[in-house]
Image: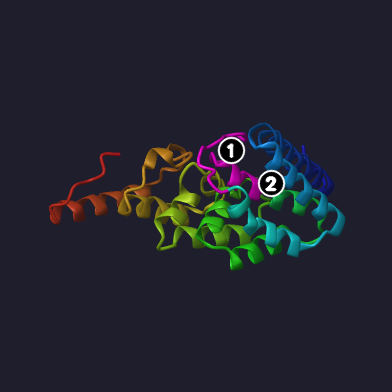
Amino acid sequence: RLNTRRDIFVLRNRALMAYISSIQLLLEKELSILNYGWVKSIISELEKEGSDTILFYNFSLCSRKLKGSIELFSCINNCPSMNLMEWTRVYFVLSFHRITSKTFFDIFKKLKETSDVQETITLYKGLSLYPFSNELKNSAEEGVRSNMKEVFESVSLNNFFPSEHFEEDAWNQMILKALFVEAPLYKIQNFDSRKNEALSLMAIDYALERISASRSINPE
């Protein structure tokens, strides 16, 4: 039983270290010797300098250093599969969080403000690995409202964060949008356990509108 803030801190730190270790093992196994050497050098720089400038620069530089990363790898159960470039970016973020005194959301917010679309997608894919805060939840909900389908799907598909943290209204809006953009519902984690009456009524209204417009209905 968790009785103190220290207990919670210890558990969160253990989880963080486990995530970092799992990603490190994946990168060491799958990256070339040259690329893994580069990754290790950046981690050493971060630990020595503790500068977010180093993080931001190399987070972006991954697209040049690790270009061509296509194959998806799964190394943490509650996180979507990602390619090696994405895992490296998440590795940098979590490693910097471990050694800095800044709050995680401050790091996340600054990265997101300067990120391109692919970098934003990576940040959202890693949501389940980050220390939770209401600000992080609000940012995830912002991702669901994105006009870009890829960004929406990085939050909604194969990601445990929404089912664990979204309130009912935000969850229902995400499911309804998934129907509109024809995202596969079976990839939404814990979909069955989050079913609710309001969502059922929304789905019925959606189906009736589609029928009246002579449009097909998602069989899911």
The image quarter in which residue 77 lies: top right
Q: Main secondary structure of the magenta part?
A: loop
Residue placed at 71% from the left, 33% from the top? 25
Between 35 and 84, the one lying in front of the other is 35
Kind of residue indicated by mark 1: Asn
The image quarter in which residue 33 lies: top right
Of the 4 image quadrants, the one containing the C terminus is top left
Residue under pointer 2: 91
Kind of residue indicated by mark 2: Tyr
Residue under pointer 1: 78
Residue placed at 62% from the left, 35% from the top? 76
Is 102 a magenta residue? Answer: no
Residue 101 screen position, x and y as percent:
82, 60
Residue 100 screen position, x and y as percent:
81, 57
Residue placed at 81% from the left, 54% from the top? 45
Element under label 1? loop
Of the 4 image quadrants, the one containing the N terminus is top right
Which contiguous range is marked in magenta?
Answer: 67-91
